[in-house]
Image (spheres, rainbow, N blue to C red):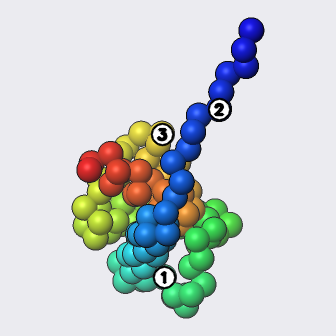
Amino acid sequence: MAAARPAIMTPVTEPDLAAYVASREQLLDQLRDVLLEDLRLAIPREQIEPDTPLFGTGLALDSIDAVDLIVGIERRTGVRISDDQAGRLGLRSVNMAINYLLAAKREAA
């Protein structure tokens, strides 16, 4: 019996990678804007790093903040945050929110 061949992956070209990185940076800036302007967090902008948890030990957002966060993200990005498991998991950290938004934008395209 022949072994299964691995799928051939399309190589990522430099322009594709540059566009992906630019998209992530743009969403990070938008998310920082929501946190600093809409939620009025009193921390330096650069302290909001991609791996920062949004709730609990990270930025310590509460349930009221979660509503403001969702409204701000939806308003600034045009992406609707679903009220299901995926939407809740997508808001665990800054990075997870960016991943959620990128995936939602890909699905909408």
The answer to whether marks 2 and 3 mark residues whose Cβ atoms lie closer than 8 Å is no
Image point 41% across, 51% down: which residue? 103
Circle nearer the N terminus (2, 1): 2
Residue that appears at 56% across and 79% down: 48
Q: Is residue 64 visible?
A: no
CA gap, disc 2 to disc 1? 48 Å
The mark that comes first in sequence, 2 or 3, is 2
* Residue located at (53% from left, 66% from top): 94
- CA neighbours of label 2 inside 10 A, class few (<14), some (14 to 19), many (20+): few
Amino acid type for the residue under numbered disc 1: Leu
The mark total stands at 3
Q: Which mark is residue 85?
A: 3
Sequence-wise first label, 1 or 3: 1
- Residue 100 against residue 19 in the figure, above or below: above
x and y percentages locating residue 33 in the rendered image: 39, 80
Q: Are marks 2 and 1 in contact (CB under 8 Å)?
A: no
One can see residue 82 in this view: yes
Front: mark 1 or 3:
3
Q: Toward the viewer: 13 or 72?
A: 13
Q: CA distance from mark 1 to mark 3?
A: 26 Å
Residue situated furthest top in the rendering: 1
Q: Is residue 74 above or below residue 39?
A: above
Give 48 or 68, whichever is nearer the viewer: 48
Q: Which residue is mark 2?
A: 6
Give the label on residue 41, or none: 1
Location of residue 70 (image quadrant): bottom left
Element carrying mark 3: helix
| Label 1 Cα neighbours within 10 Å, binned few <14 / some 14-19 / many ≥20 | some
Residue 53, above or below 45: above
